[in-house]
Each structure stands twice: as structure tokens, then as C-alpha cells.
Image: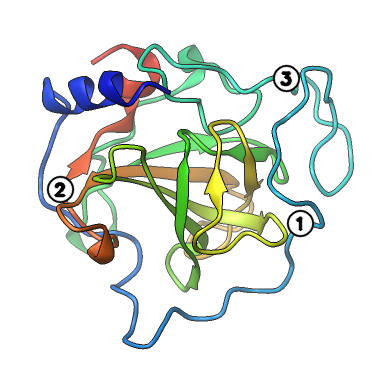
Amino acid sequence: MRAAALAFLLASGCALASGCRLEPPPAAGGAAEPRTDTLQEAPRRVAPDEGARLGGGAMPGAADPVLAPSGLVVPVVGVAPADLVDTYGDARGEGRAHDAIDIPAPRGTPVVAAVSGPVLQRFASDAGGLTVYQLGPDARTVFYYAHLDAVADGLAAGHVLRAGDVLGAVGDSGNAAPGDTHLHFAIWRVTDPAEFWDGPPVNPYPLLTGRR
């Protein structure tokens, strides 16, 4: 992904508003230990002819990660920009707004990095379930992948992902309804990457579809 293209899009009309993530800021001294049911593969790219879900079983239509108009990779394999629905801003429980989009897919569908950049944290919480935070190439944009069914084996803070690398698999962990398997994908801006867990949110939908 071209960092300049992303920076332009973020500065030219993507909705910004204050908001909170699915989990609270990490406690002092480090994050909670994630679950141990991780994928038995290191982060990697999905081969053009790969038609198998991570963890076993067939996934019809699996293909190369799709490049969005902005230069981001659509973070769920087999999903095209035209398949996405803008759920950003939808009402959620306890008066919360949905500062993300949900991307439905079968359990185990590979989740891939939307950009190239380091993993900030691998985390497990009651709300987000298995989650991965990633810093974008501009060092000011955070990409958040939640409700994962599994996280790639060996993935940890500091691991540098390339756009399209597999980081986990779609699931319903955390507060997702049982069986409602989807990726909760959020983007937000930070001024200090050391405080990466919250910031003004950005609607991923225009970035992934080219539509507003």
C-alpha cells in the first residue's frame, strides 16, 4: 500500500469522531495473555491458487487478497469491495456507536493484514475476543482486527506484517453472537503510537470500496 494514498484519503473527508474500542486500554505492565488455540502457521501471504481454509476444510472462492481502490487490502480473503456493507455508525448496546465495519465470512476464513506494518499488540478480551492491533506505515494509523477465531502462530507485538499476510481467522470470539462469524475491522488515528488503543475513528468503508 502506498502510504501517501492512505494519508490523502484519511485527510480528505473520511469521517472522524471520538470513540472507544471494544476493549479498555491495556493495563500497566502488559496485556492479558491471549487464548492458546492459535493457528499452526506463521504469518504468510495467501497463494493465488489456495482454496483451503486455515485450520482445515474447503473454502470455495478463496483467492488472492483483494486490493481496494485506496491501496488497502480487503482484510478478509474471498471478499470483494462490492460485497461490503457500511455498518459504521450503526447503534450498538449501551448507547455505543459502531466505529468499525463488520465483514461476515465463514468461520476460519483467513484474515489478512490490510497494510504493511508492525503488530502493536495481540490481545484477548471479553468484548473483542481475540484481537490484533497493527500500526500503519505512516506510524499514526491503527488497524484493528477483532472477534478472531484464531491468531497466526507466533504472531506477537513487533512482528512486521506485509499487506496480505495472514494474521488470523474469522470467528465469533468476544461479545459477538454465537455463530455470527465476522471480522470487526476498525481504523483510527493516534498522535502517539505508544497510546495506540484509542483515537478518532475513521470509517473503513470508503477506503475499502471507493464509495462514501
Left or right, 209 with respect to 50, comes to left
Q: Earlier in the sequence, mark 3 or mark 2?
A: 3
Classify mark 2: residues with Cα within 10 Å, few (<14), some (14-19) or many (20+).
some
Q: Amino acid at mark 2?
A: Pro
Is the residue 11 above or below the residue 112 in the image? above
Q: Nearer the viewer, residue 76 or 103?
A: 76
Which residue lies under the disc numbered 3?
Answer: 63
The numbered mark at residue 39 is: 1
Which label sits on residue 48? none
Question: Residue drawn 11% across and 22% down?
Answer: 13
CA separation in Å, label 3 and label 1: 19 Å
Of callouts 2 and 1, which one flags the residue occurring earlier in the amino acid sequence?
A: 1
Q: Measuring 68% from the left and 39% from the top, which residue is drawn there? A: 110
> Position of 38 compared to 158: left or right?
right
Q: Pointer 3 and pointer 2: residues touching (CB < 8 Å)?
A: no
Dot 1, crowdedness within 10 Å: few (<14), some or many (≥20)? Answer: many
- Disc 1 is placed on an element classified as loop
Q: Residue furthest bottom?
A: 29
State the quadrant of the N terminus: top left
Q: Quadrant of residue 105?
A: top right
Q: Is residue 36 above or below residue 92?
A: below
Spatial CA span between label 3 and label 2: 33 Å
> Secondary structure beneath disc 2?
loop
Query: Mark 2 = which residue?
Result: 200
